[in-house]
Image (spheres, helix red, strand yellow):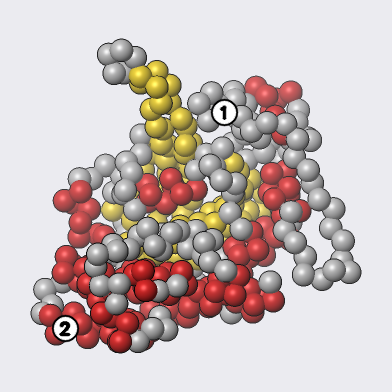
Amino acid sequence: MQMLAQAGRIRGNNMEKNKLLSLKNVSKTFPVGKTLLGKPTKFVHAVNNVSFDVYEGETFSIVGESGCGKSTTGRLINHLLIPDSGEIWFQGKEISKISQDEMRPLRKDMQMIFQDPAGSLNPRMRVSELIEEPLLIHTDLDKEGRMKIVNELLGIVGLSAKHAQRFPHEFSGGQKQRIGIARALTVNPKLVIADEPISALDVSIQAQVLNLLHRLQETYKLTYVFISHDLSVVEMISDRIAVMYLGFVVETAPKDMLYKSPLHPYTKALLSAVPIPDPTLHKERIILEGDIPSTINLPKGCPFAARCNHCRPECLERRPEPKEVEPGHVVSCHLY
């Protein structure tokens, strides 16, 4: 925890206010079950009317329980999935409905770091080949030029040129994630989507990777969409945070504002579960009762109503609209 706290102190408050990414009422469903004719009988509502903006140079984090839709949102941004409705704007271009051929030139500006470093690296390829691959697709550099960049990147992420000819199975989990980060940086992206990038690593290695991500952001002016279920980690790296529940964004705010003055009952419950390093301090834990509603049959009203201690009749009948309670602090709750 102390090492993660050290990683947290490196966050700065300065960021450019140029909008890089914008999601507008984005939704995504997945079919489950089929009739004899092959038509789907039910749909999982994974992402529901999600809207937020991401600005150049910031770290925008998406947090929530497993299954809340945060990873699906990341894949929608990166065009690995196509939304059912809504718009996704990147660098002033609407990309949600464009073809893969149209998306290809934009991929160099939008890279992804995955949760499982071992699963995202081809075990049959050497490290040099893994990092070189984006350069083959997006540049016309010769072999010498590509290998120069590969060796430079290995040094930047804390490895060395001698590691270039090894295979992924020869590395630890933390080293594999460093290789994944190096590969994401090969084509100088503007946006990096980091989907649970440290959840599979030991705590001491987590701090190293967080510090590396921050250093790279400062050096290369990167913008991060950081996806995590760990609020302790999110506090260390974020500028702004969106909280998701059952596929909905229920609260969005700057980091300091969210941690000091959470508004949504779900956000308050999540933050109450974050451990405090000081054993002399006591924090009351908010225990959520009731079952999580089905993503197949979404509730008519507020998605959190069944587990909320402040539930009102209107919460069961009508979904709350996002409301900006104070500048930059938006919440979807009938209490406000």
Q: Is residue 298 visible?
A: yes
Q: Are marks 1 and 2 in contact (CB under 8 Å)?
A: no
Residue 318 is situated, as x and y percent measured from the top left of the image, at 62, 25
Residue 258: x %, y % from top left: 67, 57
Mark 1 or 2, nearer chain start: 2
User: Where's residue 78, x and y in %?
Assistant: 34, 53
Which residue type carries mark 2?
Answer: Gly
The amino acid marked with disc number 1 is: Ser
Does residue 280 sit above or below 21 in this rendering? below
Q: Nearer the viewer, residue 230 or 316?
A: 230
Q: Where is the N terminus found, in terms of image quarters?
A: bottom right
Neighbour class for label 2 at 10 Å: few (<14), some, many (≥20)? few
Please name the residue shown 37% across and 74% down the image: 170
Residue at horizontal 57%, vertical 28%?
294
Depth check, front residue: 197 or 205 = 205
Spot occupied by residue 97 in the image (x, y as percentages of width and height) = 26, 42
Quarter placement of the C terminus:
top right
- In this picture, residue 37 sits left or right of residue 263: left
Q: Nearer the viewer, residue 118 or 193?
A: 118
Quadrant in the rendering for residue 165? bottom left
Against 60, residue 5 (above or below) is below
List the residue tagged with mark 2.
145
- Residue placed at 29% from the left, 18% from the top? 38
Badge number at residue 294 = 1
Residue drawn at point x = 35 percent, y = 87 percent = 160
Q: Which secondary structure, mark 1? A: loop
